[in-house]
Structures are given as C-alpha cells and as structure tokens.
Image (cartoon, rainbow, N blue to C red):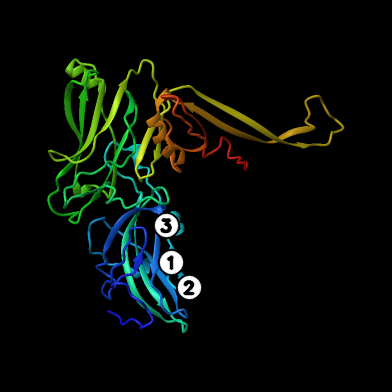
Amino acid sequence: MKKKKDTIQKNDGKLNVLRNVELQVPNETVSNAVITNLTLVSGGKWVKLIHGNVEDSGEIDMFDVDNAFFGINTFVIDLSKKFLTLNKSNDGDIYFNLNGVLLKRIGYKIDFLNSEDWVDTGTIIPYAINAYTKHTDGTRTFVDNAFTFTINGYTRSLEGNNMETLGYVYNVQTDNTVKLLTSQPTKQYVNGQTEFINFILKDSTHGSGTNFNFGILYTYYTFSNKLITTCLKHQKGKNDLNNINTVKLNPDISSIEEENQKQVGYFTVSLMKEEQVISNELRYNVFSDCFNSVNDFAFLNRLGGWESFNFNGETSQELKTKRNTIFKNQSYSYTVSDQIESVNNVFGEESYSVKSNFISKEIMEWLKEFAMSKAVYELATKRYIVVDDFDISFNSQKSKYQVEMKYHYSDTINNNIQKK
C-alpha cells in the first residue's frame, strides 16, 4: 500500500461516501475493488473526502468497467478507461457530486420491443473511482478507491435509494425473497395487451456454478376467486441472464379458457427459481376485449425497469401546417397559371391524443412514473414519442378517473423541423 502523507486524514481506513456508496482501501494494483451497494442515479450520489490540509486539493478519477456483473467481487480496473477527473479545493471536507456525470452516461436498451425472451434493460452501469490528494507541486497521493453500480432511476431526494436494502435485488447466494422491479398496483388487462416484468439479479458465481432456471409462474382464477390452473413460462438459466432483466408476459387468456372451459376473472404472475416462488406477485383483472381496445405505451419506470399502460379510450390526432412563400416578378408573357407568390416550404406539426378508460386512484398514483419518464414508446409502431402533456390530478372525492396524454413523434413528416 502506498504511503499516505500525514496531512491526509482517514476515517477508519475509508473514504466517507454519502448515499450508500462506501469506498474500501484496495491493493496497489487497483484490482479486487470492492463492489458496493446498488443505487439509483438520481438519488443523490456524493463522494466525501476527509481533508486536513487546506493547501492541497482533492481529486477523483472515474473509470468505465467492462463485463462487470453485480455480485462478483473481483475485477481488474483498466486505468486506460478513465472518462473523467474531478478536482476540488476546500478548507475542510471535500464533496464531489457524481449525479450530473452519471446522468449523462447512463442509458437503456430497447431490445424488449422486438423480443419474446428475457432481455437486458441496459439501465445499469458499473464504474470505478480512484481518490487522490493533489499537492501544490502537482503530484498526487493515492488515497482510496471503490467499484460500484448505478441504475437509471430516481427517487425523492430525501428517501433511501439502496436497492438491496429496499428489497429489489435477488441474491443467488442468500436466496432471498425479492420485490419485482415495479410499483404498480392491481391492473386491468385486455386480451392482447402488452405487459412486462423486471427483476434485478445479483450472483457471485455468474457464468459458472449450477445454471438453475428462472421463470414466471402464471396463476389463473375465476371471477369468484376459484383456482383454474397454473403454468410456468419464460424459463432461462441464471448464467444467461443479466443484472436487470425484463420479459414480455404471455398470459394467453384465450387458450387457458378453451383448455379449462372456464372464464378467467384475473391472473397473477410471480418470479420462480426452479420450483420455488421467490418474489411478490402482480395481479391483473381481466376485462372483455369486446368493449376495450388495446393501445399500449411502454415507459421506463423510476426503478430502471420497463412497464406499459393501455390507453384504451378515445384517440385523436391533429396536423397543423405552416408555409413559407417566396415572391416572383411577373413576366411579360404571363398567364393566369403563373406564380407570383409561391410555396417554398411546408412545415407539418403532428400531435396525438389518447385517453384511458376509467382507472383507480392507485393506478393514478402509479402513473406519475409514466408522466415523469424520459423514455416512452408507442408499442403499436415501436416509435419513441415525446410527451407534450400528461398531467396527473386526483382527489379524495372520486374513486374513478380518466387520464389524457398528448404527444408527438420524434421524427417529422418531411424532415422540416421547426423549433417550438
């Protein structure tokens, strides 16, 4: 271990890092970095450097880490993968706010749009931090480092964002019960509607060990709460899964009703590991498709998973046009068909509006995540959409509500883009 200058104050051999990220002292090769807690990117991620010499500044380097899996505790950090250095001076302790940096680098994948299998949400990133004290002569003394993961999600500023503490991480080694990656209450379901299920996997033996299967257990009931049948679908080995996984559900109501000669009133889904239920269950009340249409939209929820909502009410669309014209001189041999003012360019501005059926107050509460989402797709066209207006308003006087969303596509009809 490198010798540290006397002016660097240590706190039990660790750097203090707020918001559930803790840095451990590694060896000098910058390998075997400790994997720490899994947190949401918008939850407030601060690094605190205990600092004793006001003449020196604090400095951290941040690195991309390839092929990391949450739960595996040994990685070699490639120092050539550095993407940022932050430097700050202060009379006392030094705080580095990483939120702005991580928000620009974290993203998501849209494989779920074209797959019936388990896919990677792409909403988790690993990164490493090296911390230094930078001296007035330009040299640096290594202090500490850490390796951690962040999810593309958010929470309230003063709420905890440690995903393991909150119960959203399934750890293969501890075999705990896990919460599915959603806040949704009981939902309405129309045959043909698209629904997704997500979960986080932590595995210290990923890529090796027993490759037991994960799957989704469907349990079907009548309107009078009598069990009809169960079935297990979407099975996949743990070594073929990702840190955050999503799959499109396939309840196949018509086949269940035909095979069992009973009408399905509702069904539940839960996560299975081999023969063991390991998660909470989600419930879907089945509504007739005779009076309800399917108009699904997928959105990235606050926990880094993909969800959907069906706007099965009234739809409308509008096209507004604007023309730029030019003027020409009248020729000596003019005719009535000549152009004096003529159209040089036409701009088209499309807008769409969709309404829901009547929904509960609990669904309204959950739809706040839809309204706040920065990634929304119209599933019928698989297009990315920009939400223009989606206000959520409800009170204690009513039990049923309707919501309306106005949006437009990210591309235009003729590539003539006007600033709004």
Q: Residue at x 81, y 24 (%)?
A: 336
| Circle number at residue 95 | 1
Whether tag 1 and tag 2 are in contact, CB under 8 A, the answer is yes
Question: Which of pointers 3 and 2 lies earlier in the amino acid sequence?
Answer: 2
Residue 76 percent across, percent down from the top left: 27, 67
- Disc 3 marks a residue whose amino acid type is Leu
Label disc, if present, on residue 18 of the rendered structure: none
N-term mark: 3 or 1: 1
Which label's residue is closer to the chain start, 1 or 2? 2
Label 2: how many Cα within 10 Å (few below 14, some 14–19, many 20+): some
Q: The residue tagged with tag 3: helix, strand or loop? A: helix
Residue nearer the viewer, 344 or 36: 36
Residue 33, x across and y down, in percent: 27, 66
Q: Residue 89: where, in percent of width, then height?
A: 48, 73
Give the residue displayed 53% in from the left and 39% down from the top: 411
In this rendering, the answer to whether 243 lies above or below 141 is above
The amino acid pointed to by label 1 is Tyr
Mark 3 vs mark 1: give the one in front: 1
- Quadrant location of the N terminus in the rendered image: bottom left
The residue singled out by tag 2 in the image is 90
Kindly state the secondary structure of the residue where label 2 is placed.
loop
Give the side of residue 97 with respect to residue 174, left or right.
right
